[in-house]
Image (tube, helix red, strand yellow):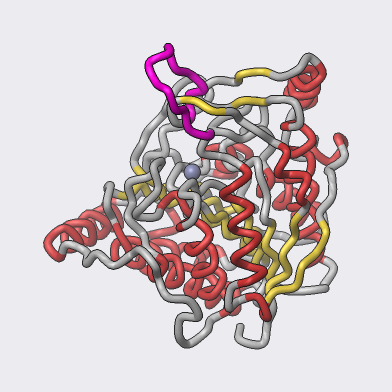
Amino acid sequence: MADEVIHVFWEEGMLRHDAGRGVFDSGLDPGFLDVLEAHPENAGRVKNMVSILKRGPIAPFLSWHQGRRALISELLSFHTQEYIDELVEADRSGGKDFGGGTFLNPGSWDSALLAAGTTLSAMKHILDGNGKVSYALVRPPGHHAQPTRADGYCFLNNAGLAVELALSSGVSKVAVIDIDVHYGNGTAEGFYRSNRVLTISLHMNHGSWGPSHPQDGTVGELGEGEGYGYNLNIPLPNGSGNRGYAHAVTELVVPAIERFDPEMMVLVVGQDSSAFDANGRQCLTMEGYRRIGQIVGEMAEKHSAGRVLIVQEGGYHLTYSAYCLHATLEGVLGFPAPLLSDPLGCYPEDEAFTVAVVQSINKFHRESVVPFLK
Ligand SMILES: [Zn+2]
């Protein structure tokens, strides 16, 4: 994709969402601590993503576009009216704690509408033939938001809404590849009964985390009805690292995409799979993100005429997340050598552990009941 630029969609109003301070993401402290930290999903992390893309070496290969608010009517392609009413009422009444660190505060709803609308604009840009690769730089994130509920810092499923837009615009099949460290349960749930959307999620094996997140992310969640076999969960051992991820993508994701042959690809990115993220245990470095981006770019060239929408999700290390994002976009563009060196990720991977990770992925492959891997 060396001739291609990435079209970045962004709107600074999304910075107004403020999930507060606390013991990490809890919003709470019984009074034991003098210094509380900002909620991990804070404006600073995204400010750094904006600035590294504007001032880093990838800057000449990016084209910036203004985002927008979604209309309420646009949200109903993925979410129920009752749930949207609940969000509107939560905003009108001054805010709501949805549990699990998911706080809708004054300003949050407007940011959520901007994130959803900006992602829709990024997808429409591709659908209209104005570019092949778009990146929706958005917050609050979306991939945990299910049709009927908020979850995991997410209110509206930005990627899911974009997929619905593609489907209603004549695209017959969309593949979603989610590399955020957490299971993209909301997106999976939204398309669980569809054979037009192959949802693939590589994630930490964290399981269900409560009533807002009943899905467990295991290999047995395969979809239902017409959608049976069209949800591919790839839970990975903690510490899987660059080689473990590259192996999983090459051995499991690539063959599934080969068989599905999508007309549109959506890469859902979270830098919380990085070695330095407080929310994840997967130990990717810039090199690993770059490699994943490269493979996705190659798959898009082969199957979807180079068309890929990239959607921002988690990634909570204030500085390293931005560097990992830069590396991912470098990979998608297919540069032959890194544009930016890694300021942090210098630890060698443990050889014996990497071998064990690869063996466990191979075992998953052999024992998988996922139709796309047969
Ligand atoms: Zn995440």
Q: Position of residue 109 (x, y in %)?
A: 76, 31
User: Which x, y percent locates residue 230?
Assistant: 53, 49
Q: Can you name the residue that lies furthest to the front here?
A: 34
Quadrant location of the N terminus in the rendered image? bottom right
Of residue 72 and residue 47, the one placed in the foreground of this image is 47
Q: Quadrant of residue 155?
A: top right
Magenta stretch contains residue 310: no
The structure residue drawn at horizontal position 54% and vertical position 55%, both measured from the top left corner, is 269
Give the residues in magenta: 25-38
**305 w.r.t. 320: above or below:** below
Q: Can residue 3 be spotted in the picture? A: yes
Q: Residue at x 58, y 37 (%)?
A: 186
The vertical placement of 185 against 29, above or below, is below
| Residue 35 within the segment the image draws in magenta | yes
Q: Quadrant of the C terminus?
A: bottom left
- In the shown orientation, is residue 166 left or right of residue 41? right
Q: Nearer the viewer, residue 151 or 108?
A: 108
Q: Nearer the viewer, residue 270 or 262?
A: 270
Q: Quadrant of residue 333?
A: bottom right
Q: Is residue 312 left or right of residue 33?
A: right
Q: Residue shown at 78%/52% (left/top)?
A: 11
